[in-house]
Image: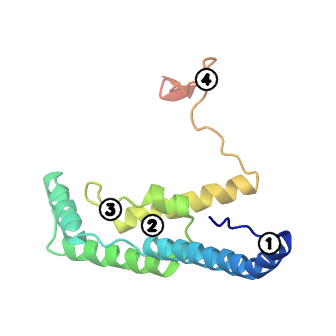
Amino acid sequence: MSVFSISTVHAGTARLRLRPIIANAAIIAGVITGLIGVVADSAQAQVPTVNIQKTCRAAATAMVSLGSPGSERDEEICLKSENDARERMTKDWSSYDGSDRKDCVQPNGYLPSYIEWLTCFEMSRNVREMRQKGQMMTPVLPTGRDGYMTLPKVRNGKMVY
C-alpha cells in the first residue's frame, strides 16, 4: 500500500508554479466578465423599433373623431415627426442615462411614440440639471396643512389663497 504525500519543499515549488496560472485565470475571468457587460450594454444601446405607422394612423383617426377637420397629410406629418425623433434618439442614445432609458422607453405600451420618449429624455435631463444647480421648483398650487396641494378658491373670477 502506497501513501501519496508531498513534502513541504515540493509544496512550495508547486505554489510557485501555480501563482502565474492563477493570476492569468483571474485576468481572463475579469476580461470575460467585462465582455459580457459590454455585450449586454450594446444590446440595450439601440433604440427599439416600433410600428410607428400604427401610432400615427390611430392619432390621425383620433383627431378626426375629436372634430378636427383632418387632412390626408396628418399621418404623413406624424410619420415624419416620429422618424425625425427616432433619428435624434439614435444619434444621442449613448448620452441618455440608463435609468431614463428604462423609464422612458416603453416599446410594448399602447401606441408607442419616439416623440414621447424623446420628450421624456429631455424632461429627465432638465430636472436632473435643475437639481444639480439647486434650482427647486415652486409648487403651482398652494399646499394645505395636511401637505396636499389644493385648488385655490375663486371669487369674482379671481383666485383667493
- Return the residue at label 1: 11
Nearest to N terminus: mark 4 or mark 3: 3
- Return the residue at label 4: 147
Closer to the observer: label 1 or label 4?
Answer: 1
- Return the residue at label 2: 118
**Label 3: how many Cα within 10 Å (few below 14, some 14–19, many 20+):** some
Nearest to N terminus: mark 1 or mark 4: 1
SS assignment at label 2: helix
Closer to the observer: label 1 or label 3?
Answer: 1
Q: Residue at x 64, y 57 (%)?
A: 128
SS assignment at label 4: loop
Closer to the observer: label 4 or label 3?
Answer: 3
Q: Looking at the rendering, which quadrant does residue 13 occupy? A: bottom right
SS assignment at label 1: helix
Q: CA distance from mark 2 to mark 1?
A: 63 Å
Disc 2 residue type (three-letter): Leu
**Label 4: how many Cα within 10 Å (few below 14, some 14–19, many 20+):** few
